[in-house]
Image: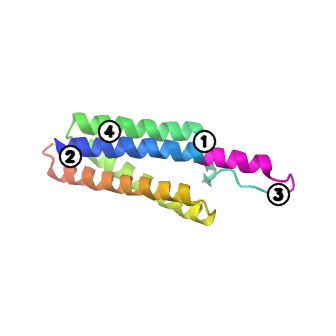
Amino acid sequence: MKARWLLSALLIVAAALFAIGAAAERDTHSEHNETAEHSESTETSEEVLGINLESTPLVLIGVGISVALAAAAWLTNRKVILLVATLFAVAFAALDIAEFAHQIDQSASGLAALAAIVALLHLAAAFVADQRRRHATS
């Protein structure tokens, strides 16, 4: 029961902090753009394969998937659910680490620290999910 609680809590807390970080970064970009010169080129979004990873719909989808996986992991011990949770958390951690590096480059220490915390939470969630999967019977 402790592992169920821990995995669900890790996923939900990571999702909440991710949403807070995305909103804070969006506010930072808005403030920067309002004070920037028209001739200055400012980067306001991070794109991977042409997809803006900071768009509100994608942030909401990421949070929604995290909450859904937290609920599913709480309610069941099915290996496939735990595998999906593991893979999702690892993928999210990779994006969090990339965000950490980006924020360090931008000298945004607060956002970098938040990205590092979220990455650690996702890595912990991946570890707990994988351990549960390895010990699951179905």
User: Alpha carbon of mark 1 to alpha carbon of mark 2: how far?
Assistant: 32 Å
User: Alpha carbon of mark 3 to alpha carbon of mark 4: how far?
Assistant: 43 Å
Q: Residue at x 35, y 44 (%)?
A: 11
Q: Position of residue 69 (x, y in %)?
A: 34, 39
Circle 1 or circle 2, nearest the eye: 2
Tag on residue 70?
4
Q: Quadrant of the N terminus?
A: top left
User: Alpha carbon of mark 4 to alpha carbon of mark 2: how far?
Assistant: 12 Å
* Residue 13 position (above or below residue 109): above
Q: Does the magenta segment cover residue 74? A: no
Q: Which residues are magenta?
A: 25-39
Q: Which residue reaches farthest front?
A: 110
Among numbered discs 4 and 1, the one appearing first in the sequence: 1
Q: Residue at x 36, y 35 (%)?
A: 68
Please name the residue that numbered disc 1 is placed on.
Answer: 55
Q: Determine whether, in the image, residue 12 is placed left or right of residue 47.
A: left
Among numbered discs 3 and 1, the one appearing first in the sequence: 3
Q: Disc 2 marks which amino acid? A: Ala
Circle 3 or circle 4, nearest the eye: 3
Q: Position of residue 112 (x, y in %)?
A: 53, 59
Q: Residue at x 53, y 41 (%)?
A: 59
The residue carrying pointer 4 sits among few (fewer than 14), some (14 to 19) or many (20 or more) residues within 10 Å by Cα, namely: many
